[in-house]
Image: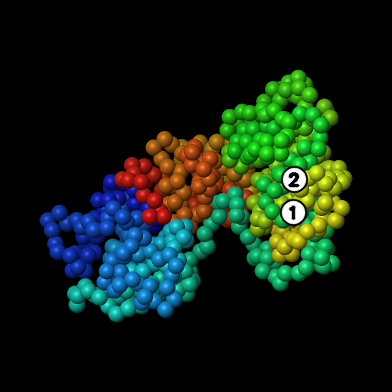
Amino acid sequence: MTYFYRIARTKRDEEQIHELNYKTFVEEIPQHCPNDDRRLMDPFHKENTYLLCMKDSKVIGMIAVRSNRPFSLDKKLGPVEKKLSNPPRDPVEIRLLSIEAQYRTGRPFLGMLQALVNWCLKAGYDAAVISGTVRELKLYRQLGFVPFAEPTGTEEASFVPMILTHETYETGISGRITKPMLNFLPGPTAITDDVRKALSANPISHRSSAHARTMQSVQKQLKLLTKARHVQVLQGTGTLANDVVAAQLGRLSGKGLILVNGEFGARLCDHGSRFGLHYDSLEVGWGETFDMRRLEAVLDSEKICWVWFVHCETSTGVLNNLDRINKLCSERNIRIAVDCASSLGTVPVNLEAVDFGTSGSGKGLGSYSGLALVFHKQDIQPDSKIPRYLDLGNYISAEGIPFTQSSNLLLALDKAVLQVMHNPESHFLAIQKRSLMLRTAIEQMGYQILAQEPDASPGILTIVLKKDESAVHLGEDLFLNGYRTHYESNYLRKRNWLQLAAMNEMSDIEVTRFLQVLERLTSFNREPIRELNIYN
């Protein structure tokens, strides 16, 4: 872990960029004239985004990327697309690819190229063009760059126009030896080979016996996992599942109570309002838990017919106390509905006494998103007043398959749930261990994890960044190094939080490497030169 990668943002970065630029393109490659300052500022400096290779606090390599047209190659050759038989849709130009001489073999160069590919994927570019020095042409070819025009420049400083695409990168040395990105997102989840294979199988009719058997298998395993009496699988996401529950709550007489301590509790209120439900809300601060005595007092003082809340509040990592809330409601004959999107498959979930529960096929279950899950305690009849697709009774009367369904998504979910059910105790213990490892190290770095034990979900850790730091900048830099983290949602940006999901399988060695990179990057996550947008 000697080397790591980040986007240039500080005054010190800027100084080292100009110094390395001078060493490379004045002293080594005589492209520019010498000067007494021994610094060279690129004419497109203010438009460039610089991807840096760091050794401790020193910049040892850089790549400048720029998407503004015309490219410098456009000025030399005309539009580069006209020189290419298969022109890219959204290219970016690489300039000033430079690394200090003693680091030009091995990991630093390969790591810089991986950082470039990660940056392009993040920003949505499908190719990178460059004027590569002729003296390093063999190395460029090995890394996946393909020449597409004759050399330009002078005899002393000759350059070859080249292009790098995701396909040519994967066939080069870097692509063949680079490890896949490590996923700390709460969704989309990391997918195992068996689940991926199931999704790519030939589709079959949703009216076939084979599809019905897969549906029965999924329902059986989900009921074993949750102790729920019934579960229906819908084509959609957790949002659809909550709409289905809102439609059922609308059939109940009396007033409801929605508990809110984060973004997704607030979204339940939005579901309720859109369906015209009669309800009050009990709200506490983000990251806080509900006072059971206060909740009990509300339930006793008001005529509450149903309570709806989120089990794991994804926006904060708080794990609300399902058992305690369920007990309070059961004692008062109050119906209960719970959103388990980020808890199912991450922690043990008992829905035996829950009237309605919802989740999705992604996140803790480890499959692709696209299937909504609705758990229910009672048998429910179809209701013509509810839109057909949202009518839970339709699914029950049709034995779970009232409409067209994706056999591939269902088969993938079946494989994923079977993997969890193979040894659920070991599965949950591994998540807890991973979460504790992350929490301990991050708190030792001096950062606060928002949700505290025993009210924290092991599946999601919310890091509260310091006032002079940026969660967005840190998340972007982590992505360059091969780590997907959660920081782009508006509710996280607004609060300057970065989240790590421990629900994805990874080794202790991989977690340790991540923590080493995180610790190095946080020391640079200050003093912005200017607001640099990776979408340039």
Residue 4 lies in what quarter of the image?
bottom left
Mark 2 or 1, nearer chain start? 1
Towards the viewer: 140 or 489 = 489
Cα gap from disc 2 to disc 1, whole angstroms? 10 Å
Secondary structure found at label 2: helix
Q: Residues within 10 Å of mark 2 (few under 14, many from 20)?
A: many
Q: Is residue 190 left or right of residue 90?
A: right
Q: Is residue 111 visible?
A: no
* Disc 1 residue type (three-letter): Leu
Coordinates of residue 249 in the picture (x, y in percent): 77, 38
Is 40 placed above or below 304 here? below
Residue 210 lies in what quarter of the image?
bottom right
Quadrant in the picture for the N terminus: bottom left
The residue that mark 1 highlights is 234
* Disc 2 residue type (three-letter): Val
Coordinates of residue 114 in the picture (x, y in percent): 43, 63
Q: Residue at x 29, y 74 (%)?
A: 77
Towards the viewer: 355 or 469 = 355
Coordinates of residue 55 in the picture (x, y in percent): 35, 55
Quadrant in the picture for the C terminus: bottom left
Coordinates of residue 84 in the picture (x, y in percent): 39, 76
Query: What is the total number of numbered labels drawn onto the structure image?
Result: 2
Is 181 placed above or below 373 here? below
Q: Is residue 152 visible?
A: yes
The residue that mark 2 highlights is 244
Tags 2 and 1 touching, CB below 8 Å: yes
Secondary structure found at label 1: strand
Q: Is residue 517 left or right of residue 131?
A: right
Q: Residue at x 62, y 36 (%)?
A: 266
Q: Residue at x 42, y 42 (%)?
A: 470
